[in-house]
């Protein structure tokens, strides 16, 4: 091994290191490009043209998996007595609560969809729940339910936004989904922000989406393949370098053995 550190081998070592590092770096660059484009596509899907809620999901329908994050137009009567607070929600590095109030779509006794109106640090600081008619756009989200259920149905704090838990606080059916009040959508005249009617967001911080829509399987797949190709090249360059060092070391040992043997033969004469 000391022979491989001789100055005459420095150029070879430097070349191997440069090629390997460059290939790894280019692979990381392509992987980052793949991740960025997929994240951008997922975010963009939340800004498509809003659709009426009932054209996306009906009161008794299962959640459509390809509609995560779809903006939907919601109109109906607020159910203030059904307001609940979902704990453990992050906002700007702080942990607090989602403020959720069901909105009966259409008539006051119709099926309702839980609407995440916003975020608050403490339920005691939450403004009064809205009443009457509301019209807004919300990002559609699948109901939660992979973790702990509500162990105390007598209060209005929930560990997750589970439809099975929210329904304990209302006297009507609920949609198999919830909506987060949208802050942006595709260009057009939509009930968003100042254009919304009684959307219940006053006095609350905006809530963030828990789940973004999935990007297409083939989004930026070329960048991913390039990343794999560069990493393969890096591994190949490293393999060649290690193989060369092993062969060079073996050749040096053989030369040394031959030299010693030749010297011994001369001495024996």
Image (cartoon, rainbow, N blue to C red):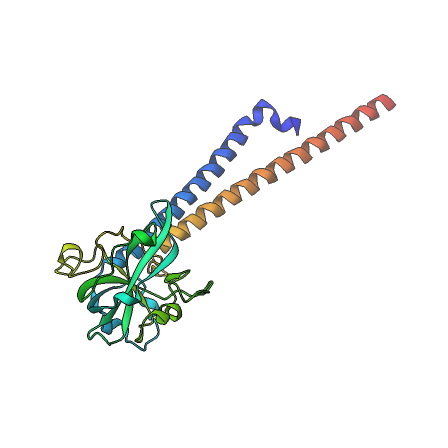
- Front one among 247 and 111: 111
The extreme right residue here reads 268
Left or right: residue 141 compared with residue 18: left
Q: Identify which residue is drawn at 24% across, 76% down.
A: 109
Percent across and percent down for residue 89 are 37, 53
Figure quadrant of residue 185: bottom left
At a point 66% along the width and 30% down the height, the residue shown is 1
Q: Nearer the viewer, residue 268 or 106?
A: 106
Total labels: the figure holds 0
The answer to whether 45 appears left or right of 31 in the picture is left
- Identify the residue shown where x is 37% and y is 55%: 221
Question: Is any atom of residue 71 visible in this view?
Answer: yes
Q: Quadrant of residue 57?
A: bottom left
Quadrant location of the C terminus?
A: top right
Residue 125: x and y in percent read 30, 51
Residue nearest the observer in this picture, 252 or 168: 168
Residue 162: give x, y in percent of width and height. Answer: 39, 66
The answer to which of 57 and 238 lies nearer the viewer is 57
Position above or below: 202 against 252? below
Residue 28 versus residue 116 in the image, above or below: above
Image spot of residue 226 (x, y percent): 40, 49
The answer, for residue 40, to whether it is visible in the render is no
User: Is residue 76 left or right of 64 when viewed as pictured?
Assistant: left
Direction bottom: furthest residue: 60
């Amino acid at each position: 091994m000391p022979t491989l550190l001789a100055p005459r081998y420095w150029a070879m070592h430097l070349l191997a290191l440069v090629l390997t590092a460059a290939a790894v770096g280019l692979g990381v660059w392509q992987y980052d490009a793949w991740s960025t484009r997929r994240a951008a596509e997922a975010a963009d899907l939340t800004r498509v043209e809003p659709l009426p809620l009932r054209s996306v999901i009906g009161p008794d329908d299962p959640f459509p998996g390809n509609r995560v994050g779809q903006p939907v137009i919601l109109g109906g009567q607020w159910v203030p007595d059904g307001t609940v607070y979902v704990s453990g929600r992050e906002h700007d590095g702080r942990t607090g609560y989602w403020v959720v109030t069901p909105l009966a779509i259409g008539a006051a006794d119709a099926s309702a969809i839980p609407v995440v109106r916003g975020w608050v640090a403490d339920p005691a600081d939450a403004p009064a729940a809205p009443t009457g008619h509301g019209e807004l756009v919300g990002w559609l989200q699948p109901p939660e339910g992979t973790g702990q259920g509500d162990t105390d149905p007598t209060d209005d704090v929930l560990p997750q936004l589970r439809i099975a838990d929210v329904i304990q606080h209302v006297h009507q059916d609920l949609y198999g989904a919830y909506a987060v009040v949208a802050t942006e959508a595709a260009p057009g005249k939509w009930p968003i922000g100042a254009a919304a009617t009684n959307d219940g967001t006053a006095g609350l911080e905006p809530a963030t989406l828990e789940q973004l829509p999935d990007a297409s399987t083939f989004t930026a797949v070329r960048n991913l393949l390039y990343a794999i190709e560069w990493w393969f090249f890096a591994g190949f360059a490293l393999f060649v370098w290690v193989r060369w060092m092993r062969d060079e070391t073996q050749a040096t040992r053989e030369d040394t053995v031959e030299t010693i043997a030749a010297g011994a033969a001369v001495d024996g004469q």
